[in-house]
Amino acid sequence: MKRPDERPPLFGTNGIRGEPNADLTPDFALQIGKSIGTYFKDGTIAMGRDTRDTGPMIFNAVSSGIMSAGKDILDLGILPTPAIQFYCKINRIPGVVITASHNPPRFNGIKCIAADGTELPRNQEEIIESIYYGRSFIQAAWNNCGRVRTITDAVERYIEGIMQQVNTEAIRTREFRVIFDAGNGAAYSSTPELLRRLGCSVVTLNANPDGKFTSRNSEPRPENLKDLINVVSGGKFDLGIAHDGDADRAVFIDSTGHFVDGDITLSLIVKSVIKPGDRVVTPISSSDALDEICAAGEAELIRTRVGAPLVSRTMIEKKAKIGGEENGGIIYGPHQYCRDGAMTAALVLNLMATRKAGLKELVSEIPEYHIHKLSTDRKVEWETIKRGILGYASGMKTDTSDGLKIFLKDGWVLVRPSGTEPIIRIYGESRNMARARDIAQEYQALIDGIQEGASAL
Ligand code: MG
């Protein structure tokens, strides 16, 4: 039984996530809204959501709470998370996004945005949590309660912002044939609109906003993008593009139907934008290819713990130009300090246009590395697993800044407990694909052995 003084954190690595009417109830969302409205000093808060069916229910509960604290709501409607963040940035107001990103449709979430457009730092989420647990809400008098205003131009501002960052003339001249798989998600109309303005002929797949994500799983992995890959394989397109549910990530299919890993896209874009002296930020989970690329381009590579908000914050602190994760989440500083799927798509088209090359050709210039990802159920304490692995890998160079990274002669392995699920994630990297898989499998078997041994005690 939970003791009444237990105050578990509510915000995870990407906001509050839960199943509506199970743990994420409207009552809870209302209290969170009151806490957010009490916390933010600004009188106006922007709000938007993705396409999930439970979006309006959670949105209305959170916005009621915020208004009861006397703050006004700008309702931006359904739009990509980075479009909401961009709106916050250019108007210097905080925001709240109702989304569960790539999670299955049964989930939803609440994510807070600071007035600079970045995800709210953890120490500020903790203040919101303490307001929630202390029930120390501001309650405005009837004539000071917040009001709602509907905003219709947030997507327009966002598209204009992206177009300012690329060579639109060069892209238009190429008249790219692009197919875009929206996966029923939040960018169902904004990304096709951006592509059309960049002179592309655009075919869309699953570009209907369907809150049950009936077309495909929202995580943009190759196994979920079979339809897109099949169509591109027919040879009629220069590029295939897909986002996750809230469109802060983008992945690409080259003109031959080959899925390009997020790690490779990150390397490509970093390589194309860095100048000597620039700084690049990425977590310890992304490829060593970036070390090579940054060394060759005389840029400084800064490694962080895993998590996009941390990469964003570090980019701001270190004045970095570009950063990102290995899953297709790319952060382009000159635009805004958050992952942005449509910005990423525009940067890839910009590169193809200015280099007058196809994606396949550009990818062939990137040093070849492979990351193999596995996971296994976590059955014992992480510290027990960590001790077991350190014993096995004694004498090897390690990094314990986030989970446990072990540097091998011909690659590395990163083992870390998931922040959201009871699993251990295992990443193995090597220049050779089979070796990367072997590394990941070796450590998966090792962890399973450690857990069996520990639970048998
Ligand atoms: Mg996302």
Image (cartoon, rainbow, N blue to C red):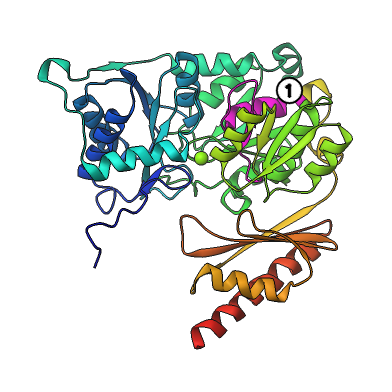
Q: Mark 1 CB in 8 Å range of ligand 1?
A: no
Is 348 left or right of 306, judged from the image as shown?
A: right
Residue 91 screen position, x and y as percent: 45, 14
Residue toward you, 334 or 51:
334
Residue at 40 percent across and 45 percent down: it is: 11
Q: Is residue 423 above or below residue 100?
A: below
Picture quadrant of residue 74: top left
Q: Is residue 339 above or below residue 259?
A: above
Picture quadrant of residue 414: bottom right
| Three-letter code, disc 1 | Asn
Q: Identify the secondary structure beneath mark 1.
A: helix
Pointer 1: residues within 10 angstroms few (<14), some, or many (20+)? many
Is 168 left or right of 249, judged from the image as shown?
A: right
Residue at the bottom extreme, as displayed: 457
Residue 430 screen position, x and y as percent: 80, 58
Residue 254 visible? The answer is: no
Is 456 left or right of 146, judged from the image as shown?
A: right
Residue at the top extreme, as displayed: 169
Residue toward you, 382 or 445:
382
Residue 331 screen position, x and y as percent: 62, 31
Residue 73 visible? The answer is: yes
Q: Is residue 391 above or below residue 337?
A: below
Residue hosting label 1: 350
Residue at 29 percent across and 33 percent down: it is: 59
Q: Is residue 338 magenta?
A: yes
Residue at 56 percent across and 85 percent down: it is: 453
Residue at the left extreme, as displayed: 142
Residue 69 screen position, x and y as percent: 22, 26
Q: What's the magenta region?
A: 326-351
All told, the count of numbered labels is 1
Residue toward you, 153 or 421:
421
Picture quadrant of residue 237: top right
